[in-house]
Structures are given as C-alpha cells and as structure tokens.
Amino acid sequence: MTKKKVLLRIDPALHDTLRKWADDDFRSINAQIEFLLQKAVAENRRDSNDA
C-alpha cells in the first residue's frame, strides 16, 4: 500500500505532546497521528465510500 504524503504544520507544544504520547505507545509521531486520525474517522462513521 502506498501512502500519501501530507505537510502538517502544528504548534510546537502540540508536537511535544504527541511525541511523548507516541513514545508511550511505542509509535513514531507519524504513526501516532495516523492512528488518531483513523480512530476519529471510525468514531464518526466516515469511510472512503462516504462522499
């Protein structure tokens, strides 16, 4: 599976928080952000078939 590249600009404090959270979960920051986005999409019942 190929992944899309996205430039993301976030507040440094948020980045630090995500880094610490990712470290706690043994993930990279990128993997943590992707995990959180997937969780948010699932919780809001959005999928690729919804347009």
Image (cartoon, helix red, strand yellow):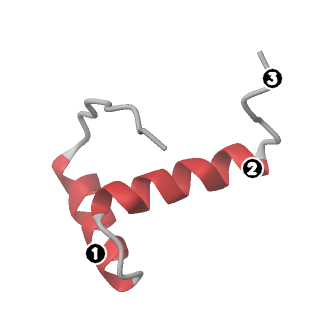
Residue at 22% over, 43% down: 11
Residue at 65% over, 49% down: 40
Question: Badges 3 and 2: C-beta atoms under 8 Å apart?
Answer: no
The earlier-in-sequence mark between 3 and 2 is 2
Residue at 74% over, 49% down: 42
Residue assigned mark 3: 50
Q: Would you place residue 20 above or below residue 17 in this image?
A: below
Determine the secondary structure under disc 3: loop
Circle 1 or circle 2, nearest the eye: 2
Answer with left or right where residue 24 lies relative to residue 10. right
Q: Would you place residue 37 above or below residue 3 in this image?
A: below
Looking at this view, is 16 or 26 the one in front? Answer: 26
Answer with left or right where residue 32 lies relative to residue 41. left
Q: Amino acid at mark 2?
A: Ala
Residue at 28% over, 34% down: 8
Please identify the quadrant where the C terminus is shown.
top right
The earlier-in-sequence mark between 3 and 1 is 1
- The span from disc 1 to disc 2 (Cα, nearest Å) is 24 Å
Q: Amino acid at mark 3?
A: Asp
- Location of residue 6 in the rendering, given as x and y in whole percent from the top left corner: 32, 30
Q: Would you place residue 15 above or below residue 8 in this image?
A: below
Mark 3: few, some, or many residues within 10 Å (few <14, many ≥20)?
Answer: few
Circle 3 or circle 1, nearest the eye: 3
Looking at this view, is 36 or 16 the one in front? Answer: 36
Residue assigned mark 1: 20
User: Residue 27, located in which quarter of the rendered image?
Assistant: bottom left
Residue assigned mark 2: 42
- Location of residue 26 in the rendering, given as x and y in whole percent from the top left corner: 35, 82
Q: Amino acid at mark 1?
A: Lys
Determine the secondary structure under disc 2: helix
Mark 1: few, some, or many residues within 10 Å (few <14, many ≥20)?
Answer: some
